[in-house]
Amino acid sequence: MSIDSRLEVTPSESSTAGVNKHGYRSFALREFHFERDEYFVHLSWPTGTHVMSIDAFLRALQRDLAWNFFYGIVNFDGVFGTVNHYGTVDIFAGRYNDAYRKAELDHLENVDTEEIRDVFAAMLDDWTNAGFDPFASPSETGSAFGVKHGSNTEAVTRRRVVAARMVGLPGDEALRTDEDGHHVNRQFADVEQDEPEVHANDGYEDRVGAFNLAAYLSRSPVTWNPSIVSVCRDSLMCPTTEEYILPIMHGNDRAEWFVVLSDEIIWDVEDRDSGAKRAKVTMKPGDVSAMPADIRHQGYAPKRSMLLVWENASSELPDLIAAGKISPLPVEF
Ligand code: PHB
Ligand code: FE
């Protein structure tokens, strides 16, 4: 075995321009550089370097991209992540980490959303091997590791469910069925699949609807991926099915509410800016929690669970909270 692994590169391994000896492309976004090998992503920026397990990185990258950089901050871990400014995105290292800040090793670049989207999409597609689905639970997908072998473009470009009014209404997102490939998950085999009967008065057929949310969620093929199933002005109902670990630590720019509909979810809650530990919240079916706008959170689901995330999509909230005009706390007791 060679000490300097570069000596192991043979012409055939390194023959394709821009592809490293593991078969992967390298990427740059301004002063951030991204490189992958069999197990890890290696990040670098002018004041530092960082390493993450590639499976965790791809799971976070998949969500950041699919959610169009989400609300507020998406921490891939305690060091690296993005902040959504709805038109531009900050990409940062150490910005929300007390030790990096104090040592002045943090770094941030502000880029147009399109620019980061293009780089992240190309990176996700190139670095995801055949058989690995970053949205699937670890028990229901293959491995992210190894030298480059194939791709899974269909999975990494999957369309997100975003209802205009409500799932099941005419012209809106469809219910899930066996026929369209949405089978009941192994852990939701006991969920009843009947649908409510709707008897609308004449003329109201396209304005009245109802559907079985538990049945809909039991057929979700993905984890930690809130779908927008109903919309009332800025009020978005975003249920999701959870298993294993939420791949991001979300630092929201507004309050949000969680209702656990089945099984159990444990939340780690930290200060949004420093990462200092704030709380651990264990939620059982029927429990409701309100996440303030000055924290970040990450969830753990030991068994597949149904969670309702309730978001207020008003574009005015981040500025009102940042200016201190409204409280970061959704409720005070
Ligand atoms: C969140 O960050 O609030 C979040 C994200 C994805 C989920 C659940 C919660 O599946
Ligand atoms: Fe959140």
Image: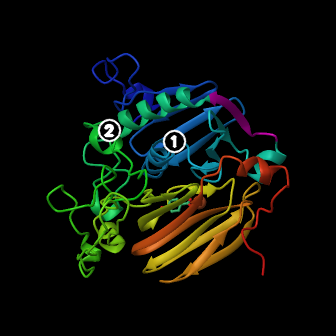
Looking at this view, is 74 or 22 the one in front?
Answer: 74
Q: Quadrant of residue 138?
A: bottom left
Tell me if residue 320 can be seen.
Answer: yes
Q: Secondary structure at mark 2?
A: loop
Q: Is residue 168 left or right of residue 109?
A: left
Category of crowding for the residue at label 1, using alpha-carbon neighbours closer than 10 angstroms: few (below 14), some (14–19), many (at least 20):
some
Q: Is residue 84 above or below residue 56?
A: above
Q: Residue at x 53, y 28 (%)?
A: 114
Asked which colour scheme the image uses, the reply is rainbow
Mark 1: which amino acid?
A: Asn
The picture places residue 277, in percent across and down from the top left corner, at 72, 68
Q: Decide whether the magenta segment is chiefly helix, strand or loop.
A: strand
The N terminus lies in quadrant: top left
Q: Is residue 4 above or below residue 144?
A: above
Looking at this view, is 129 or 118 the one in front?
Answer: 118
The picture places residue 10, in percent across and down from the top left corner, at 32, 22
The picture places residue 247, in percent across and down from the top left corner, at 50, 56
- Establish whether ligand 1 lies closer than 8 Å to the Cβ of label 1: no
Outermost front residue: 202
Looking at this view, is 206 or 77 the one in front?
Answer: 206
Q: Which residues are magenta?
A: 104-111
Category of crowding for the residue at label 2, using alpha-carbon neighbours closer than 10 angstroms: few (below 14), some (14–19), many (at least 20):
some
- CB of mark 1 within 8 Å of CB of mark 2? no
Tell me if residue 96 can be seen.
Answer: no
Label 1, on which residue?
68
How far apart are the two marked residues, 1 and 2, measured between alpha carbons? Answer: 29 Å
Mark 2: which amino acid?
A: Val
Counting residues from the N terminus, which is met first, the one under dot 1 or under dot 2? Answer: 1
| Res. 147 mark | 2
Q: Residue at x 54, y 75 (%)?
A: 266
